[in-house]
Image: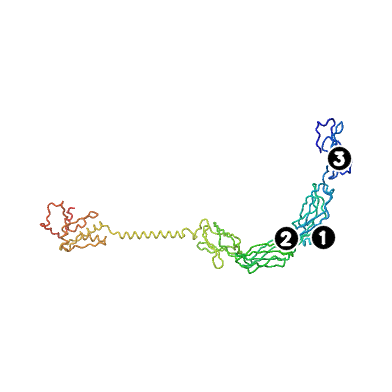
């Protein structure tokens, strides 16, 4: 490729370019020429990544232009032809130092970019040897190498001939090969070189679990380390009781059989938690531990903190199982609070279920739920299902306790009111007007007794006796048989009216009390003798008296 000349500099007809080339190493001292109208121009048969001298000269019908200065170029790259040789490996624990002999420059067929180290882990040393023996029995080592476990590629940039490879697994067998690469790609692999890493301490066990046969026992279960890094010779178990003071002694158990994967601890405190450290052992020593905390499981009991969701014909019960309690089986007893209701029992329920649906209940019915444990009631609750209440149940409206109480109170109150009305009516007595009318009828029917004055009884005393019936607390003094009383009785008469207009004390025999305005002449109390009192009352005189 070259930059074309400006047409103003062609300076003649039949303008073209003269392209010349030859190998730079001098194996072809003579130039090869060709004329072309313009770039580009392809030279064939040069070989891979060969060095050439090149020049381009302008010519026309009058001759050649100035002679150019030759340039050096190469043909295209190709895959390298050779691989490194004399490979050696020095191993230190999980790293190795790899050295090799570089290839010749002409075999690279391009610019050398570096080397690639291929590592293949065939497995642990014991496993790899057994695996290799099986492979040889099947037809050779090469066939067995196809079952490689892991692959690792380390890229080395530039022309270095030594590299340190890290991250290798201990007690493992590796296979190594090296290639050369350029911009075209990689060359062939070198012959394989095998080496092994030394034995080391194992990694932590893969897992650690617990079972609690009783409140004072724990069974530990574990899996061997994923990276044994050698031949396991056993395990070391350490455990310590967790306390606030932190001064609990560290207990030690050594397991010498590498095939054992469980261990039983006895005599533990059921009220304490423990921390456990389990390590694998090889001839190189103990590895890092797997650490877990655990406590023994207590005897299971039925749940007590139960949440309830009531439906029409069922009730859902849910609870949270205790962390330290073993699974416990129990039954839920339920009683319908209807007439003739009997205790029924659910199917067997486990505490680890954390949920149970009690079905087959009656809508709108009260139930009593019960869970017993041992000889006592562990949990109890009363519920009422939703929906209409069935006929004839104890919870019917007419047989509810509050309704019966209300009806009883109303009946008692009505009886009390009737008693009070009866007492009031019996204490009211007769009206005064009716008594007066009865007295008048009796006085007309009785004969007048005018033989003696001492047998006369005034109506005033009769009225007093009548009043004493309605007012028993008042006492009335009798005036019969007293001369002074008769004199006073003749002096003045106090006439009063009752409610019906009749006279009070009209049979007393007293005259009207004289007043200053009503007298026809001056009254002389000294000269005028009082008229004798009448021997007996006259009904006509009484009726003829002025009111």
Q: Assign a secondary structure to mark 1.
A: helix
- Number of the front mark, 2 or 3: 3
Q: Assign a secondary structure to mark 3.
A: strand
Any mark on residue 180, and which? Answer: none
Within 10 Å of disc 2 (Cα), the crowding (few <14, some 14-19, many 20+) is some
C-alpha span from label 2 to label 1: 26 Å
Residue 113 in the image: state x and y as whole percent: 79, 48
The residue singled out by tag 1 in the image is: 136
CB under 8 Å between discs 2 and 1: no
Left or right: 78, with 389 as reference point = right
Q: Residue furthest bottom?
A: 267
Residue 421 in the image: state x and y as whole percent: 34, 59
Within 10 Å of disc 3 (Cα), the crowding (few <14, some 14-19, many 20+) is many
Residue lying at 86% horizontally and 38% vertically, measured from the top left: 20
Left or right: 208, with 44 as reference point = left
Where is the N terminus found, in terms of image quarters? Answer: top right
Left or right: 542, with 18 as reference point = left
Which residue is at the front of the view, 210 or 46?
46
- Number of the front mark, 2 or 1: 2
Q: Residue furthest top?
A: 12
Which residue is at the front of the view, 336 or 281?
281
Which residue is at the front of the view, 54 or 428?
54
C-alpha span from label 2 to label 3: 63 Å
| Mark 1 or 3, nearer chain start | 3
- Number of the front mark, 1 or 3: 3
The residue singled out by tag 3 in the image is: 21
Within 10 Å of disc 1 (Cα), the crowding (few <14, some 14-19, many 20+) is few
Q: Assign a secondary structure to mark 2.
A: loop
Q: Quadrant of residue 206?
A: bottom right
C-alpha span from label 1 to label 3: 57 Å
Which residue is at the front of the view, 534 or 32?
32
The residue singled out by tag 2 in the image is: 227
């Amino acid at each position: 490729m070259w930059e074309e000349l400006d047409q103003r500099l062609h300076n003649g007809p039949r303008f073209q370019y003269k392209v010349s080339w030859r190998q730079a190493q001098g194996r072809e001292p003579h130039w090869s020429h060709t004329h072309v109208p313009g770039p580009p121009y392809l030279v064939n048969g040069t070989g891979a990544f060969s060095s050439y001298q090149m020049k381009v000269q302008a010519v026309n019908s009058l001759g050649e232009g100035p002679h150019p200065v030759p340039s050096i170029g190469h043909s295209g790259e190709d895959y390298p032809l050779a691989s490194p040789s004399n490979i050696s490996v020095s191993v230190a624990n999980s790293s190795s130092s790899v050295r090799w002999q570089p290839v010749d420059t002409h075999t690279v067929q391009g610019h050398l970019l570096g080397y690639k180290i291929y590592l293949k882990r065939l497995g642990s040393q014991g496993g790899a040897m057994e695996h290799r023996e099986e492979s040889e029995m099947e037809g050779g080592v090469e066939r067995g190498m196809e079952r490689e476990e892991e692959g690792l590629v380390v890229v080395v940039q530039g022309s270095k001939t030594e590299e340190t490879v890290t991250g290798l697994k201990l007690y493992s067998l590796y296979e190594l090969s090296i290639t050369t690469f350029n911009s075209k790609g990689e060359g062939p692999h070198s012959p394989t070189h095998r080496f092994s890493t030394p034995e080391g301490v194992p990694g932590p066990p893969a897992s650690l679990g617990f079972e609690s046969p009783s409140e004072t026992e724990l069974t530990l279960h574990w899996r061997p380390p994923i990276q044994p890094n050698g031949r396991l010779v056993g395990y070391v178990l350490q455990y310590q009781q967790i306390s606030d003071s932190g001064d609990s002694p560290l207990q030690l158990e050594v397991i010498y059989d590498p095939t054992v994967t469980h261990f039983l601890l006895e005599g533990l405190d059921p009220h304490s938690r423990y921390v456990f450290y389990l390590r694998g052992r090889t001839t190189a020593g103990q590895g890092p531990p797997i650490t877990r905390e655990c406590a023994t499981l207590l005897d299971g009991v039925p749940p007590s903190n139960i949440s309830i969701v009531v439906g029409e014909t069922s009730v859902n019960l849910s609870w949270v199982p205790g962390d330290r309690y073993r699974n416990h089986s129990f039954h839920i007893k339920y009683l319908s609070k209807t007439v003739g209701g009997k205790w029924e029992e659910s199917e067997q329920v486990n505490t680890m279920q954390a949920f149970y649906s009690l079905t087959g209940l009656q809508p709108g019915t009260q139930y009593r739920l019960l869970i017993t444990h041992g000889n006592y009631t562990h949990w109890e609750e009363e519920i009422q299902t939703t929906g209409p209440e069935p006929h004839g149940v104890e919870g019917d409206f007419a047989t509810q306790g509050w309704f019966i109480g209300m009806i009883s109170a109303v009946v008692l109150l009505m009886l009390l009111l009737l008693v009070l009305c009866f007492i009031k009516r019996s204490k009211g007595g007769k009206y005064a007007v009716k008594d007066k009318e009865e007295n008048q009828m009796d006085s007309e029917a009785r004969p007048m007794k005018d033989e003696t004055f001492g047998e006369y009884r005034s109506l005033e005393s009769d009225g007093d006796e009548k009043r004493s019936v309605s007012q028993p607390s008042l006492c009335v003094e009798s005036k019969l048989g007293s001369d002074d009383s008769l004199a006073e009785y003749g002096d003045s008469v106090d006439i009063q009216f009752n409610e019906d207009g009749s006279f009070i004390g009209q049979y007393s025999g007293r005259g009207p009390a004289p007043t200053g305005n009503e007298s026809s002449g001056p009254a002389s109390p000294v000269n005028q003798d009082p008229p004798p009192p009448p021997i007996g009352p006259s009904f006509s005189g009484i009726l003829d008296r002025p009111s």
